[in-house]
Amino acid sequence: MNDPIRDALPDTTADETPDAFFLPLGDGRFRPTTHAQGAWSEHESHMAPVSGLMLHELETRLPRPDLALSRVAFDILGKIPAEDLVVRTRVLRAGRTIELSEVDVAGPDGRSAVRATVWRLQTSDTSAVAGVEDPPMDLPGPEARFRMGGLWNSGFIRTLEVRTAEPPRPGRSRVWLRSSVPLFGGPDAPDISATARLFGLVDTANGVAVRALPSEVIFPNVDLTIHLHRDPVGEWLGLDVSVSWGVHGIGVTSAVLHDLDGPFGRSEQSATIRLR
Protein backbone atom coordinates (compact mmCIF):
# COMPACT_ATOMS: atom_id res chain seq x y z
CA MET A 1 0.00 0.00 0.00
CA ASN A 2 1.29 3.48 -0.85
CA ASP A 3 2.10 5.63 2.16
CA PRO A 4 1.10 9.24 1.32
CA ILE A 5 2.73 10.58 4.47
CA ARG A 6 6.02 8.86 3.72
CA ASP A 7 5.82 10.00 0.10
CA ALA A 8 5.12 13.62 1.01
CA LEU A 9 7.52 14.09 3.91
CA PRO A 10 11.25 13.68 4.33
CA ASP A 11 12.24 10.72 6.46
CA THR A 12 13.62 11.34 9.93
CA THR A 13 15.52 9.15 12.37
CA ALA A 14 15.79 9.04 16.13
CA ASP A 15 18.73 10.58 17.98
CA GLU A 16 20.10 7.09 18.68
CA THR A 17 20.75 4.29 16.24
CA PRO A 18 17.47 2.33 15.98
CA ASP A 19 17.73 -1.18 17.38
CA ALA A 20 14.66 -2.42 19.29
CA PHE A 21 12.45 -1.84 22.29
CA PHE A 22 13.01 -5.37 23.62
CA LEU A 23 15.50 -8.20 23.29
CA PRO A 24 13.84 -11.65 23.48
CA LEU A 25 15.54 -13.88 26.08
CA GLY A 26 13.39 -16.99 25.64
CA ASP A 27 10.70 -18.58 27.84
CA GLY A 28 8.53 -15.46 27.69
CA ARG A 29 11.27 -13.17 29.03
CA PHE A 30 12.23 -9.86 27.42
CA ARG A 31 14.88 -7.26 28.22
CA PRO A 32 13.82 -3.62 27.61
CA THR A 33 16.39 -1.31 25.99
CA THR A 34 16.83 2.42 26.59
CA HIS A 35 14.36 2.98 23.73
CA ALA A 36 11.60 1.63 26.00
CA GLN A 37 12.41 4.15 28.75
CA GLY A 38 9.36 5.71 30.43
CA ALA A 39 8.26 9.34 30.36
CA TRP A 40 8.02 9.85 34.14
CA SER A 41 11.20 8.07 35.24
CA GLU A 42 14.33 6.77 33.54
CA HIS A 43 14.09 3.71 35.78
CA GLU A 44 10.72 2.63 34.34
CA SER A 45 9.59 1.19 31.02
CA HIS A 46 7.03 3.10 28.99
CA MET A 47 3.55 1.61 28.82
CA ALA A 48 3.32 2.09 25.04
CA PRO A 49 5.91 -0.48 23.87
CA VAL A 50 4.95 -2.78 26.76
CA SER A 51 1.35 -2.87 25.49
CA GLY A 52 2.65 -3.76 22.02
CA LEU A 53 4.72 -6.54 23.56
CA MET A 54 1.69 -7.89 25.42
CA LEU A 55 -0.50 -7.89 22.31
CA HIS A 56 2.19 -9.67 20.29
CA GLU A 57 2.55 -12.37 22.94
CA LEU A 58 -1.22 -12.89 23.01
CA GLU A 59 -1.32 -13.30 19.22
CA THR A 60 1.66 -15.69 19.29
CA ARG A 61 0.79 -17.88 22.29
CA LEU A 62 -3.01 -17.90 22.06
CA PRO A 63 -3.75 -17.56 18.34
CA ARG A 64 -7.40 -17.42 17.31
CA PRO A 65 -7.48 -16.55 13.59
CA ASP A 66 -11.20 -17.32 13.58
CA LEU A 67 -11.93 -14.55 16.10
CA ALA A 68 -11.38 -10.79 15.86
CA LEU A 69 -9.83 -8.59 18.51
CA SER A 70 -12.56 -6.45 20.05
CA ARG A 71 -11.36 -4.94 23.34
CA VAL A 72 -8.14 -4.88 25.34
CA ALA A 73 -8.25 -3.41 28.86
CA PHE A 74 -4.82 -2.79 30.40
CA ASP A 75 -4.52 -2.08 34.13
CA ILE A 76 -1.19 -0.63 35.26
CA LEU A 77 -0.64 -2.17 38.68
CA GLY A 78 2.59 -0.38 39.53
CA LYS A 79 5.81 0.91 38.07
CA ILE A 80 6.90 -1.07 35.00
CA PRO A 81 10.56 -1.84 35.71
CA ALA A 82 13.30 -1.11 33.20
CA GLU A 83 14.53 -4.64 33.87
CA ASP A 84 13.85 -8.08 32.46
CA LEU A 85 10.12 -8.64 32.04
CA VAL A 86 8.15 -11.89 31.98
CA VAL A 87 4.96 -12.14 29.90
CA ARG A 88 2.31 -14.71 30.87
CA THR A 89 -0.91 -15.56 29.03
CA ARG A 90 -3.96 -17.67 29.80
CA VAL A 91 -7.53 -18.17 28.61
CA LEU A 92 -10.14 -17.05 31.15
CA ARG A 93 -13.24 -18.00 29.19
CA ALA A 94 -12.87 -20.34 26.25
CA GLY A 95 -15.49 -20.36 23.54
CA ARG A 96 -16.17 -21.07 19.89
CA THR A 97 -17.55 -17.60 19.15
CA ILE A 98 -16.40 -15.48 22.14
CA GLU A 99 -13.18 -15.77 24.12
CA LEU A 100 -11.76 -13.84 27.08
CA SER A 101 -8.00 -14.06 27.65
CA GLU A 102 -5.50 -12.48 30.00
CA VAL A 103 -1.97 -11.19 29.45
CA ASP A 104 0.26 -10.33 32.39
CA VAL A 105 3.67 -8.64 32.60
CA ALA A 106 5.84 -9.10 35.70
CA GLY A 107 9.22 -7.80 36.76
CA PRO A 108 12.15 -9.83 38.10
CA ASP A 109 10.48 -10.10 41.52
CA GLY A 110 7.48 -11.88 39.99
CA ARG A 111 4.99 -9.15 40.85
CA SER A 112 2.58 -8.11 38.10
CA ALA A 113 3.20 -4.64 36.69
CA VAL A 114 0.52 -4.66 33.95
CA ARG A 115 -2.44 -6.97 33.45
CA ALA A 116 -4.76 -6.97 30.45
CA THR A 117 -8.01 -8.75 29.67
CA VAL A 118 -8.81 -9.33 26.02
CA TRP A 119 -12.14 -10.02 24.31
CA ARG A 120 -12.05 -11.71 20.90
CA LEU A 121 -15.31 -12.17 19.00
CA GLN A 122 -16.66 -14.19 16.11
CA THR A 123 -16.40 -12.54 12.70
CA SER A 124 -19.08 -12.49 10.00
CA ASP A 125 -19.96 -10.48 6.89
CA THR A 126 -21.81 -7.37 8.11
CA SER A 127 -20.86 -5.12 5.19
CA ALA A 128 -24.55 -4.54 4.41
CA VAL A 129 -25.06 -2.66 7.70
CA ALA A 130 -21.53 -1.35 8.37
CA GLY A 131 -20.94 2.32 9.17
CA VAL A 132 -18.55 4.52 11.15
CA GLU A 133 -19.50 7.91 12.61
CA ASP A 134 -15.98 9.15 13.40
CA PRO A 135 -14.69 11.37 10.57
CA PRO A 136 -11.28 10.60 9.03
CA MET A 137 -8.27 12.75 9.89
CA ASP A 138 -6.53 14.86 7.27
CA LEU A 139 -3.01 13.75 6.49
CA PRO A 140 -0.38 16.31 7.54
CA GLY A 141 1.78 18.35 5.20
CA PRO A 142 5.57 18.66 5.26
CA GLU A 143 5.43 21.66 7.62
CA ALA A 144 3.52 19.77 10.32
CA ARG A 145 6.37 18.23 12.32
CA PHE A 146 5.73 18.18 16.09
CA ARG A 147 8.65 17.75 18.51
CA MET A 148 7.38 15.89 21.56
CA GLY A 149 10.91 16.00 22.96
CA GLY A 150 10.19 19.57 23.98
CA LEU A 151 7.70 18.23 26.54
CA TRP A 152 9.12 14.82 27.42
CA ASN A 153 12.61 13.48 28.11
CA SER A 154 12.20 9.80 27.41
CA GLY A 155 13.97 7.12 25.44
CA PHE A 156 10.64 6.02 23.98
CA ILE A 157 9.54 9.54 23.00
CA ARG A 158 12.83 10.08 21.16
CA THR A 159 11.98 7.19 18.83
CA LEU A 160 8.81 8.88 17.59
CA GLU A 161 8.19 10.79 14.40
CA VAL A 162 5.14 12.97 15.04
CA ARG A 163 3.12 15.09 12.59
CA THR A 164 0.20 17.31 13.53
CA ALA A 165 -3.06 17.16 11.61
CA GLU A 166 -4.06 20.56 13.06
CA PRO A 167 -2.42 23.03 15.49
CA PRO A 168 -2.61 21.50 19.00
CA ARG A 169 -3.95 23.31 22.05
CA PRO A 170 -4.09 22.31 25.73
CA GLY A 171 -6.48 19.37 26.03
CA ARG A 172 -6.98 18.88 22.29
CA SER A 173 -4.72 17.46 19.59
CA ARG A 174 -4.84 15.53 16.34
CA VAL A 175 -1.52 13.91 15.45
CA TRP A 176 0.01 11.18 13.34
CA LEU A 177 2.93 9.23 14.71
CA ARG A 178 5.14 6.24 14.11
CA SER A 179 8.31 4.86 15.69
CA SER A 180 11.68 4.39 14.06
CA VAL A 181 12.41 1.42 16.35
CA PRO A 182 11.04 -2.14 15.94
CA LEU A 183 9.51 -4.01 18.86
CA PHE A 184 12.16 -6.75 18.93
CA GLY A 185 15.86 -6.97 18.20
CA GLY A 186 18.37 -9.77 17.84
CA PRO A 187 19.13 -12.32 15.12
CA ASP A 188 15.91 -14.25 15.74
CA ALA A 189 13.59 -11.27 16.13
CA PRO A 190 10.01 -12.34 15.25
CA ASP A 191 7.74 -10.54 12.84
CA ILE A 192 4.91 -8.57 14.42
CA SER A 193 1.44 -7.70 13.20
CA ALA A 194 0.26 -4.18 12.37
CA THR A 195 -2.08 -4.48 15.36
CA ALA A 196 0.80 -5.12 17.78
CA ARG A 197 2.85 -2.35 16.15
CA LEU A 198 0.11 0.26 16.53
CA PHE A 199 -0.90 -0.92 20.00
CA GLY A 200 2.68 -0.09 20.91
CA LEU A 201 1.93 3.60 20.22
CA VAL A 202 -1.57 4.20 21.63
CA ASP A 203 -0.50 5.03 25.19
CA THR A 204 1.14 8.22 23.87
CA ALA A 205 -2.35 9.75 23.66
CA ASN A 206 -1.96 10.89 27.28
CA GLY A 207 1.07 12.96 26.30
CA VAL A 208 0.14 14.71 23.04
CA ALA A 209 -2.61 17.07 24.28
CA VAL A 210 -1.39 18.00 27.75
CA ARG A 211 -3.39 20.56 29.74
CA ALA A 212 -0.30 21.60 31.76
CA LEU A 213 3.44 21.15 31.47
CA PRO A 214 4.72 17.88 32.97
CA SER A 215 7.34 19.97 34.79
CA GLU A 216 4.45 21.57 36.74
CA VAL A 217 1.89 18.75 36.99
CA ILE A 218 2.25 14.97 36.87
CA PHE A 219 -0.62 13.00 35.32
CA PRO A 220 0.30 9.34 34.77
CA ASN A 221 -2.47 7.08 33.52
CA VAL A 222 -3.40 4.01 35.54
CA ASP A 223 -5.06 2.15 32.68
CA LEU A 224 -5.53 1.98 28.92
CA THR A 225 -8.63 0.54 27.26
CA ILE A 226 -8.74 0.03 23.50
CA HIS A 227 -11.90 -0.87 21.55
CA LEU A 228 -11.62 -1.92 17.89
CA HIS A 229 -14.22 -2.21 15.15
CA ARG A 230 -11.68 -3.49 12.59
CA ASP A 231 -8.04 -4.59 12.43
CA PRO A 232 -5.62 -1.68 11.87
CA VAL A 233 -3.06 -1.64 9.07
CA GLY A 234 0.27 0.00 8.35
CA GLU A 235 2.77 1.74 10.63
CA TRP A 236 1.18 5.19 11.11
CA LEU A 237 -1.18 5.78 14.04
CA GLY A 238 -3.52 8.76 14.03
CA LEU A 239 -4.72 10.07 17.41
CA ASP A 240 -7.70 12.43 17.66
CA VAL A 241 -7.29 13.27 21.35
CA SER A 242 -9.43 15.09 23.92
CA VAL A 243 -8.28 15.49 27.54
CA SER A 244 -10.59 16.35 30.46
CA TRP A 245 -9.30 17.08 33.96
CA GLY A 246 -11.67 17.37 36.91
CA VAL A 247 -11.31 19.46 40.08
CA HIS A 248 -10.51 16.51 42.38
CA GLY A 249 -7.34 15.18 40.76
CA ILE A 250 -8.84 12.77 38.22
CA GLY A 251 -8.62 13.03 34.44
CA VAL A 252 -9.72 11.17 31.32
CA THR A 253 -7.86 11.04 28.00
CA SER A 254 -10.05 9.93 25.08
CA ALA A 255 -8.87 9.26 21.54
CA VAL A 256 -10.29 8.11 18.23
CA LEU A 257 -7.70 5.82 16.65
CA HIS A 258 -6.88 6.02 12.94
CA ASP A 259 -4.65 4.38 10.39
CA LEU A 260 -4.21 5.66 6.83
CA ASP A 261 -7.48 3.97 5.83
CA GLY A 262 -9.53 5.85 8.44
CA PRO A 263 -10.81 5.31 12.00
CA PHE A 264 -10.47 1.81 13.43
CA GLY A 265 -11.27 2.20 17.14
CA ARG A 266 -11.11 4.25 20.34
CA SER A 267 -9.03 4.43 23.49
CA GLU A 268 -9.62 5.71 27.03
CA GLN A 269 -7.13 6.40 29.83
CA SER A 270 -7.73 7.34 33.48
CA ALA A 271 -5.13 9.72 34.89
CA THR A 272 -4.21 10.67 38.42
CA ILE A 273 -3.35 14.41 38.51
CA ARG A 274 -0.94 15.82 41.07
CA LEU A 275 0.52 19.31 41.32
CA ARG A 276 4.27 19.28 41.76
Image (cartoon, rainbow, N blue to C red):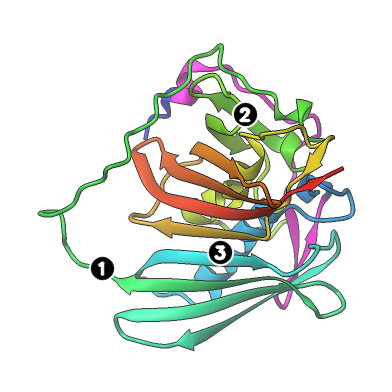
- Residue at 79% x, 62% y: name it: 80
Q: Amino acid at mark 3?
A: Leu
- Classed neighbour count for the residue bearing mark 1: other residues with Cα under 10 Å, few (<14), some (14–19), many (≥20): few
The quarter of the picture where residue 24 lies is bottom right
Nearer the observer, 36 or 212: 212
Percent across and percent down for residue 218 are 79, 45
Q: Amino acid at mark 1?
A: Thr
Q: Is 83 placed left or right of 227 in the picture?
A: right
Marks counted in the figure total 3
- Residue at 84% x, 56% y: name it: 44
Percent across and percent down for residue 159 are 71, 37
Question: Mark number for residue 123?
Answer: 1
Q: Is 42 placed left or right of 257 in the picture?
A: right
Res. 66 in view: no
* Residues shaded magenta: 5-33
Q: CA distance from mark 2 to mark 3?
A: 31 Å
Q: Which residue is mark 2?
A: 170
Question: Mark number for residue 55?
Answer: 3
Quadrant of the frame with the N terminus = top left
254 over 71 or under it: above or below: above
